[in-house]
Image (cartoon, rainbow, N blue to C red):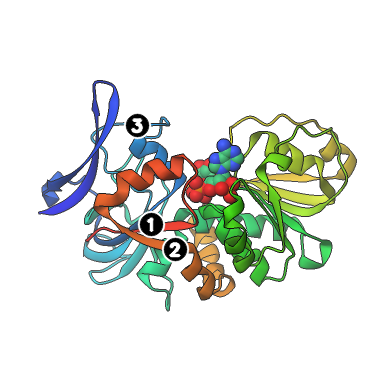
Amino acid sequence: MFKALVLDQVEGKTVAAIKTLDVSDLPEEDVLVDVKYSSINFKDGLAITGTGKIVSQFPMVPGIDLVGTVAESKSDAYKAGDQVVLTGWSVGERFWGGLSQKACLKSEWLVPLPSGMSPEVSMSIGTAGLTAMLCVMALEEGGVTPDKGPVVVSGAAGGVGSVAVAILAKLGYEVAAITGRAETEPYLRGLGATTILTREEMSEKARPLERQRWAGGIDTVGDMMLARILAEADYNATVAACGLAGGFKLPTTVMPFILRNVRLQGVDSVMCPVERRIKAWNRLQTDLPATALGEISQVIGLDDVPEYAAKIVNGQIQGRTIVDVN
Ligand code: NDP
């Protein structure tokens, strides 16, 4: 028997409760994992509070991230005792996820925990950190090097934003952080941001082209903010768009693309191929300073999850939240 957070629908509303389950309740897949930690991402917040249409069927064990030890395996790729990480693949949305002491998973969804990385560190990275790394890789692939000029990060005090700021600063980029919470300025400067911009000023409606300010951008917010970043992007800039914390619209024009050669690169971590995931996890080990992770992360218990799910949806979480499920 083990404990898991279970989402159900009661009179059209999503209800989250900690339940005791048996291994026979789990879906049948080829690897059974003893989960050590999960984490809370924006998407988990939407799923657990029922705010967004994230969960496709109930009952559902949420949790899009997990790290743990293989307990049983029918796959040649893993054996009992191996430490594995999972992010994405619609786990916690269509398939039972990581906010549970045990999970039964497809072997092809797993990646080995990078050697030398602790389980706790892997979850302080989680989907948000992996996505931040994929965004940085997208900027590099677009030719954005530190000598080209400043890079702007939106939703900077959130999970993706915090990790992105820390990686970019470690790699030598000049980082401008956009935040709606003035009180996070010392935190963001501690992660390596040298300029702090307010959400308000960066959400103002932009003209089709504004003064060129950014060699690159990582946007977790969408809507007016992404439109402004594009209008302010330098000639040849790349902007990586991965989020919609402020909305899913994009009220822009073709001008930045056709007159300034700007590249808008979408970034998805959910279906990202395994080879690219492994590359990103290895980069995270070298390019994300351990000291930054200490600043970024907090650990909570399974009982605290509903409260923190509501907080992340309301934009009240700073950095990353790790869940100790045991
Ligand atoms: P967080 O809630 O941790 O961070 C989001 C941040 O966005 C907040 O901290 C806040 O930053 C800012 N924000 C919140 N609400 C608004 C608003 N109304 N207007 C403007 N800014 C706002 O979430 P995550 O970092 O986990 O995720 C960020 C986004 O990225 C989400 O939309 C998520 O769905 C998406 N995502 C996408 C992935 C992919 O594969 N494409 C993977 C992971 C996440 P501040 O307080 O600094 O202003």
Q: Quadrant of residue 73?
A: bottom left
Q: Mark 1 or mark 3, which has the lower sequence index? A: 3
Q: Tell me which residue sits at (50%, 43%) in the image.
A: 315
Cβ atoms under marks 2 and 1 closer than 8 Å: no
Ligand 1 shown in quarter: top right
Q: Nearer the viewer, residue 141 or 326?
A: 326
User: How many C-alpha atoms fall within 10 Å of the one at disc 1: few (<14), some, or many (≥20)?
Assistant: many
Which residue type carries mark 3?
Answer: Ser
Q: Which mark is residue 297?
A: 2
Q: Which mark is residue 249?
A: none
Which residue is under mark 3?
A: 56
Return the x and y of residue 44 as percentages of the image width and height: 39, 44
Which residue type carries mark 2?
Answer: Ser
Looking at the rendering, in which quadrant would you find the C terminus?
bottom left
Looking at the rendering, in which quadrant would you find the N terminus?
bottom left
**Discs 2/3, front:** 2
**Discs 2/1, front:** 2
Return the x and y of residue 163 as percentages of the image width and height: 56, 60
Q: Mark 2 or mark 1, which has the lower sequence index? A: 1
Which residue is under mark 1?
A: 86
